Each structure stands twice: as structure tokens, then as C-alpha cells.
């Protein structure tokens, strides 16, 4: 009996020890593991430019893979729908207007953001790079920068592994991914496309000296665009425009009571004005066709990254986040390019996957996400360090992992012609401030294509006042 009793005691002791070790392992897996983090950041891609978003006029298998194996947000916004200001947010986690240019003006557009003087020590110590270095992450950056000197990847301590923005970039990134790493790493892969679509309207009316310089340097961009614009072999023009091109958007015509600020934006550069006034229906259809093909070019580049992660057996320790700096108007309101607060320009894709940690196949159609404000606290959360720059930025980790969490009810977005607050119910309060103050209340549920506005609608009087107050007290004091 004594030996049996001893045996039972030893068995119980072994089970307790095993349970403790399993619990310790479980805790390490869920709370302490530091994944490699790859942020794929593309240029000029609207939220609906993916087949997983229901767009049947293109195929994006690489992006679909991320969505199918993770989470996709439909209500994600840029902090500012133009390249350089959005990228300032990527690095600093702040609104671009936090910074001033060399003349003391708020950063609201490209020129100003490239003129940000040396940043403060507070900013230097709260960039995404600063936090991740403290968490013992190795830092890699490849591709497009479009940042002022004080905020370039090199200035912040990234290993800049490629100046290319296309195929060479992803091939070099794939080599780094396939290597063995002593430390976890954070890698930004900054791809240019579908940005090449910008050159279609530009080259037809490049009247300024700067535009002429842009075109002269754009040999690769123009060649890529021309390839994207090609009518498929054996297809007649009539069949091409009728069956191959995406149709004109439902908001093809300018918005009813279009703000003067929008007209001012269009008229400020002759190529934009020329496109609105002189592009035919078929010109716009071809623009949309090329935009879709350029997005597919980018998707093939993303596939190289996914293949490298899978082939090196690193899917179980790699968090992939995908987003864009802004979108493209793509014929909506007879506009191309960006910089507006319309959904096509401001609403951007945002997806994340980490197999075994982020439940697969989620589509979040409710919560408001800011890629500029939320990326920094999110990657810091996964690096097990608290990262705060703008206190309104929030870690997306609970949303990624399906946890119940109180989330923001409203979100602010800036642009060079005004600022807006969008709320969870789909209302948008926009205050344009170019030559005069113009207010608009839009309703994405009743009018998702923003063909008109509800500013003077009595039914929405209280909402207008509510969002006006939130604009002034919570987002843009």
C-alpha cells in the first residue's frame, strides 16, 4: 500500500509540474512572444481595390490571402490623403498638422511636409523606430520615403535596404525574410503602385516646370502605365470599353453643391482641370482600367513577400500588416489623383494576419481605424512595449484578436483643403477652409457615394451640431 501511495504522490507531483510548465508556455505564447512585423505600405490605393472587397474587375490573390487568413477593416482612414503628410504619420504616429513647415504653417500638403525642420527630442524619442529599438527590434526600411530629412528612415536608425519601389525591392526584402535573425525585426516595404496612375492625366497637361521635371524622370513609371493601359490583344476598342473596363462610378458627376474648396483643388493644377473638363467617358474608363491593372502589378509584388515568409517557415512568427497612404478618385466626381476628403481618397485598405494569433476571415465593418495614428501603438503592443505619441492613437491588437473592447466613436482626418470628423454611424462632418469656411454634413448610409450633402436637412440638425462640437473639442481644437 505504501508503494502505491508513493506512486500516486509522484504521479500527482508530475502532473502539477507539467501543468505549470504548460501554463508557463501558454503565457509566453500569448503575452511575451515578439513576432517579426512586416508593414506593407502601398501608394494611392483605395479601400475597394481588392477582389476580397467585392471588386470583380481585378484579381488580388496575395491581398486576398492576407484577408482570408486575418482581418480586414472597411472603415480605415488615412490621417491625410496625400503622400508625404501620410508618411509623416507613419513614422511619428501623429497628425501631420502637429508639425510646422519652415514658414510656421501647419503641415497639410506635400511641399510643407518636406520642409519640416529638425524635430524635437520628444518626437525623436516617440517615433515608431525609437520605441521598437527599445524593444530590441532590428529595423529595415525599403522603397518610397517622401519624408523630410529629420524623419527619414536613415535618420531614425532603420537599415535602408533598397531605394527601389518595385520588383527589386520585394526581392531584396524576400532575401532578408529568408535569413536567420537573432532578434525580431520590423520591416517596412514601401511599394509605389498603383501610384503610376497619376501620370495619365499629368502627361496630357504638364504645364508647370515641376510637372515637366516629374515627367522627364518618370521613364519607368510611364512605361509601367502604358503597359497597364494596353487594350488586350485581339480585343476591339468597342469591346474593350464595353466589357473590359470597369464601368463609370455611380458618383461620376460632381457632387451637388460641390464645395468651392474642391473646385479650387482641381483648378490649382492644370492637368486636374483638364481631366475634369476634357476627359471623355472612355478616357475615364481607361483610367479606371489602368488603375486596376497597376493594383494587380502591386499584388504580384506582395506575393513575393508572402512566398518568402511561407517558404522560410516563418508564418507562425510573422505579423503582416497591409495598408496604403491614401486612395485615388478614379473618375468619382470626374476627378483623379487624391487630396480630397471623399471616401475614394481618404478611405484606405487596412488588413493584418498572424497565423495562430489573429482569427482568420474577419471583416470589421464597424470600427474606425486610423493607419497613421494606430499603427505605432499597435506594433508596439506586439513588441511588448507601450508606445504613445498621440494619445488618440489606439492599439488595434484587441480588434485583431477578436476581443471585446470599447472603441472610438469618431475619427479625424486632415487634408490640404479642410478637415473632417467621421463617426461610427456613417456621418461625416467636413469643414473646408481654403478661401472661406464651408461646412458639409455627409451621410454614408443614405448616400454612400457622396453625391449630395445633408447640411441643411432638419432631420440631421442635432447630428451636425454634435459633430461640429466634437470637431472643435476632440480632434481639431
Image: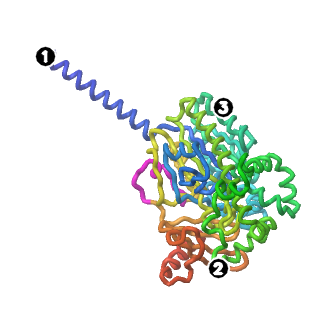
Q: How is the image coloured?
A: rainbow
- Residue at numbered disc 2: 257
Q: CA distance from mark 2 to mark 1?
A: 93 Å
Q: Is residue 61 left or right of residue 124?
A: left
Q: Residue at x 70, y 80 (%)?
A: 436
Label located before the other in sequence (2 or 1):
1
* Crowd class of label 3 (few under 14; some 14 to 19; many from 20; radius 10 Å): few
Looking at this view, is 33 or 280 the one in front?
280
Label located before the other in sequence (3 or 1):
1
Residue 440: % across, % down: 60, 77
- Residue at numbered disc 1: 2
The quadrant of the picture occupied by the C terminus is bottom right
Q: Is residue 434 magenta?
A: no
Query: Secondary structure beneath disc 1?
Result: helix
* Crowd class of label 2 (few under 14; some 14 to 19; many from 20; radius 10 Å): few
**Span shown in magenta:** 392-406
- Magenta segment, prevailing SS (helix, strand or loop): loop
Query: Secondary structure beneath disc 3?
Result: helix
Observer-side mark, 2 or 1, equals 2
The quadrant of the picture occupied by the N terminus is top left
Residue 134: % across, % down: 59, 42
Looking at this view, is 396 or 243 the one in front?
243
Label located before the other in sequence (2 or 3):
3
In this view, 14 is above or below 322: above
- Residue at numbered disc 3: 175
Point out which mark residue 186 bears.
none
How many numbered marks, from 0 up? Answer: 3
Residue 349: % across, % down: 58, 54
Look at the numbered discs 2 and 1 and tell me whether their residues touch, using CB distance below 8 Å.
no
Q: Residue at x 40, y 37 (%)?
A: 27
Amino acid at each position: 500500500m505504501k508503494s502505491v501511495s508513493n506512486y500516486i504522490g509522484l504521479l500527482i507531483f508530475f502532473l502539477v509540474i507539467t501543468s505549470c510548465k504548460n501554463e508557463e508556455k501558454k503565457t509566453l505564447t500569448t503575452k511575451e512572444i515578439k513576432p517579426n512585423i512586416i508593414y506593407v505600405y502601398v501608394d494611392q490605393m483605395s479601400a475597394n481595390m481588392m477582389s476580397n472587397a467585392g471588386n470583380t474587375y481585378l484579381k488580388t490573390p496575395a491581398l486576398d490571402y492576407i484577408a482570408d487568413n486575418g482581418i480586414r477593416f472597411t472603415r480605415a482612414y488615412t490621417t491625410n490623403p496625400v503622400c508625404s503628410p501620410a508618411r509623416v504619420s507613419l513614422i511619428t504616429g501623429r497628425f501631420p498638422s502637429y508639425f510646422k513647415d519652415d514658414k510656421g504653417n501647419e503641415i497639410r500638403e506635400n511641399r510643407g511636409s518636406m520642409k519640416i525642420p529638425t524635430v524635437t527630442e520628444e518626437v525623436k524619442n516617440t517615433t515608431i523606430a525609437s520605441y521598437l529599438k527599445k524593444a530590441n527590434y532590428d529595423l529595415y526600411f525599403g522603397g518610397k520615403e517622401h519624408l523630410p530629412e529629420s524623419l527619414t528612415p536613415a535618420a531614425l536608425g532603420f537599415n535602408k535596404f533598397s531605394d527601389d519601389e518595385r520588383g527589386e525591392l520585394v526581392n531584396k526584402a524576400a532575401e532578408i525574410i529568408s535569413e536567420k535573425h537573432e532578434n525580431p525585426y520590423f520591416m517596412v516595404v514601401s511599394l509605389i503602385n498603383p501610384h503610376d496612375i497619376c501620370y495619365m492625366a499629368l502627361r496630357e497637361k504638364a504645364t508647370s516646370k515641376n510637372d515637366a521635371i516629374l515627367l522627364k524622370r518618370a521613364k519607368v513609371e510611364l512605361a509601367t502605365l502604358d503597359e497597364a493601359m494596353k487594350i488586350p490583344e485581339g480585343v476591339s476598342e468597342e469591346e474593350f470599353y464595353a466589357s473590359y473596363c470597369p464601368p463609370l462610378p455611380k458618383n461620376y458627376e460632381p457632387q451637388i453643391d460641390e464645395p468651392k474648396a474642391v473646385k479650387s483643388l482641381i483648378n490649382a493644377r492644370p492637368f486636374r482641370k483638364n481631366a475634369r473638363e476634357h476627359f471623355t467617358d472612355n478616357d475615364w474608363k481607361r483610367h479606371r482600367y489602368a488603375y486596376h491593372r497597376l493594383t494587380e502589378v502591386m499584388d504580384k509584388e506582395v506575393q513575393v513577400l508572402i512566398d518568402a515568409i511561407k517558404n522560410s517557415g516563418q508564418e507562425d512568427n510573422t505579423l503582416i500588416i497591409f495598408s496604403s497612404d491614401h486612395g485615388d478618385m478614379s473618375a468619382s466626381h470626374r476627378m483623379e489623383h487624391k487630396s480630397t476628403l471623399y471616401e475614394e481618397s481618404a478611405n484606405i485598405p487596412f488588413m493584418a494576419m498572424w497565423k495562430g494569433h489573429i482569427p482568420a476571415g474577419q471583416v470589421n465593418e464597424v470600427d474606425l481605424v486610423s493607419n497613421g495614428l494606430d499603427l505605432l501603438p499597435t506594433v508596439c503592443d506586439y513588441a511588448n512595449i507601450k508606445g504613445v505619441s498621440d494619445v488618440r492613437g489606439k492599439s488595434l491588437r484587441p480588434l485583431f484578436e477578436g476581443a471585446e473592447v470599447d472603441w472610438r466613436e469618431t475619427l479625424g482626418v486632415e487634408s490640404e483643403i479642410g478637415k473632417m470628423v467621421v463617426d461610427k454611424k456613417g456621418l461625416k462632418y467636413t469643414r473646408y477652409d481654403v478661401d472661406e469656411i464651408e461646412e458639409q454634413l455627409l451621410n454614408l448610409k443614405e448616400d454612400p457615394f457622396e453625391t449630395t450633402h445633408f447640411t441643411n436637412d432638419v432631420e440631421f440638425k442635432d447630428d451636425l451640431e454634435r459633430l461640429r462640437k466634437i470637431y472643435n473639442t476632440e480632434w481639431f481644437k
